[in-house]
Amino acid sequence: MSTVGEFDADFYQSNYTIDNQEQGYDDADVYGNPYGVREQPNSAAFVPPEMIASSSYMGQVFQPTYNSDYYSQPTYADSFDEEPPLLEELGINFDHIWQKTLTVLNPLKPADGSIMNETDLTGPILFCIALGATLLLAGKVQFGYVYGMSAIGCLGIHALLNLMSTSGVSYGCVASVLGYCLLPMVILSSCAIFFSLQGTIGTIAALIIIGWCSLSAAKIFSSALTMEGQQLLVAYPCALLYGLFALLTIF
């Protein structure tokens, strides 16, 4: 009876050697390498021609190109230089305000129709505030009357001028002209601060100021609307309007 050691020796005996293993590999090469190590395929054979053509690109992936000509001179850099000044965009031109003021102060000076036919309300608003302020210094709180009569008077003169002229006129132009011609009335109200106008001298001064304001407004309207020979017809309703301001100033 065989022992356990003999059984193990018989069990682990094998004819498989390293020489046979090497011979198996050689035989496999002879018969076309059916079970040997497989050869790696040529990776270049499976590359599409589009990728081969684009392989010459030497840049980096996902990195945008930088164009110095585009970023060095932005398109919006010159836009700020071409914009007009802020006061001009708001319709405030001090040169035109000064020329209109001189035209009103000098009744003999001819009016420039191109300048007067503008809806410039900066000067009229300042003159209305100055008239109310001088009346306030004289002890008369009349701001509401000044603004109310100005708005209603501009509506009436606007309707009248559209009936008399062929070209027509805008409400802003009428308000601008009547407001600038209110400057002599501000002078009269300034005199009322220092002495009373309820007398002969005050009445004569008020009549002169009314004629001054109405003739200046009529001159500007006739020049801007080319109303030849109608200056006195326009001056009459303007005199009625400025007469109301004179009554506020005197009384």
Image (spheres, rainbow, N blue to C red):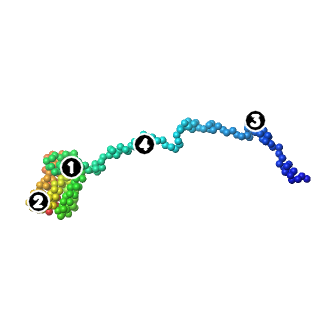
Q: Position of residue 244 (x, y in %)?
A: 16, 59
Q: Position of residue 63 (x, y in %)?
A: 50, 43
Distance from Cα at disc 2 to Cα at disc 3: 139 Å
Question: Could you tell me the amino acid type at mark 1?
Answer: Trp
- Total number of numbered labels? 4
* Residue at numbered disc 2: 202
Question: Could you tell me the amino acid type at mark 4?
Answer: Tyr
* Residue at numbered disc 3: 30
Left or right relative to 17: residue 38 = left
Query: Height in image: 48 above or below 131?
Result: above
Distance from Cα at disc 1 to Cα at disc 4: 46 Å
Q: Secondary structure at mark 1?
A: helix
Distance from Cα at disc 2 to Cα at disc 1: 29 Å
Q: Which mark is residue 98?
A: 1
Left or right relative to 242: residue 74 = right
* Residue at numbered disc 4: 71
